[in-house]
Image (tube, rainbow, N blue to C red):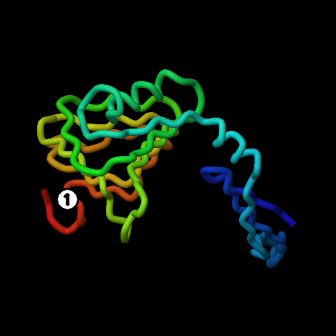
């Protein structure tokens, strides 16, 4: 039997069990069973990550997204930037490059029908509003008005549940 383990994000791993079967002179793998395994050590690491809150829609200053990213970049290890506010952000310049493993998540409860509650109007910019390095994660934004690419993402950076180039409903181009 051969076991293949896929290392997922946030400590969720999938294990697939295969049997090696020899047929017609060829070796094949036959699927037997799959399981999802949650590694408790990953939760301990996540619990020790630094968390920064975005508490207003200002472009700079305490509680802004720009401030939260800057502070997260200054701390070693995994960081979480979470929103406690909804509304429209209008950055005058691109946000700082997210360095290392930073999750920028605007999902403020309740996220209704996967519709982002934070909108970024990047119409003042001609370059990407976000620069994500490998290991960074951007989630639950509506980003529009950007004449360049909305997000510049490095290898293994993830952009999820975002509406790019539309309004908050995802139905109208902006």
Q: Residue at x 27, y 28 (%)?
A: 60
Nearer the observer, 53 or 167? 53
Residue 131 position in % (x across, y down): 35, 34
Q: Is residue 123 left or right of residue 81?
A: left
Q: Is residue 103 left or right of residue 88?
A: right
Spot the residue most to the right. Answer: 1
Residue 37 position in % (x across, y down): 75, 61
Q: Quadrant of the C terminus?
A: bottom left
Q: Residue beneath label 1, please?
A: 166
- Which image quadrant for residue 57? top left
Residue 139 position in % (x across, y down): 41, 51
- Which image quadrant for residue 50? top right
**Mark 1 falls on what kind of element?**
loop
Q: Vertically, is 70 above or below 20?
A: above
Q: Is residue 50 left or right of residue 65?
A: right
User: Callout 1: few (<14), some (14-19), or many (20+) C-alpha neighbours within 10 Å?
Assistant: some
- Which image quadrant for residue 36? bottom right
Q: Residue at x 18, y 45 (%)?
A: 121
Residue 146 position in % (x across, y down): 17, 43
């Amino acid at each position: 039997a051969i076991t293949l383990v896929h290392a997922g994000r946030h400590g969720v791993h999938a294990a697939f069990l295969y049997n090696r079967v020899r047929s017609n002179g060829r070796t094949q793998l036959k699927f037997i069973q799959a399981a999802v395994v949650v590694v408790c050590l990953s939760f301990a690491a996540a619990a020790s990550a630094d968390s920064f809150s975005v508490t207003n829609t200002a472009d700079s200053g305490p509680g802004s997204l720009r401030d939260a990213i800057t502070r997260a970049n200054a701390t070693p290890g995994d960081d979480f930037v979470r929103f406690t506010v909804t509304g429209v952000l209008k950055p005058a310049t691109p946000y700082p490059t997210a360095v290392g493993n930073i999750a920028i998540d605007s999902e403020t409860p309740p996220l209704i029908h996967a519709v982002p509650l934070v909108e970024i109007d990047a119409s003042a910019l001609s370059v990407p509003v976000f620069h994500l390095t490998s290991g960074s994660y951007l989630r639950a934004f509506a980003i529009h008005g950007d004449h360049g690419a909305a997000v510049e993402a490095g290898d293994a950076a993830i952009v999820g549940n975002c509406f790019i180039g539309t309004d908050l409903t995802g139905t109208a181009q902006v």
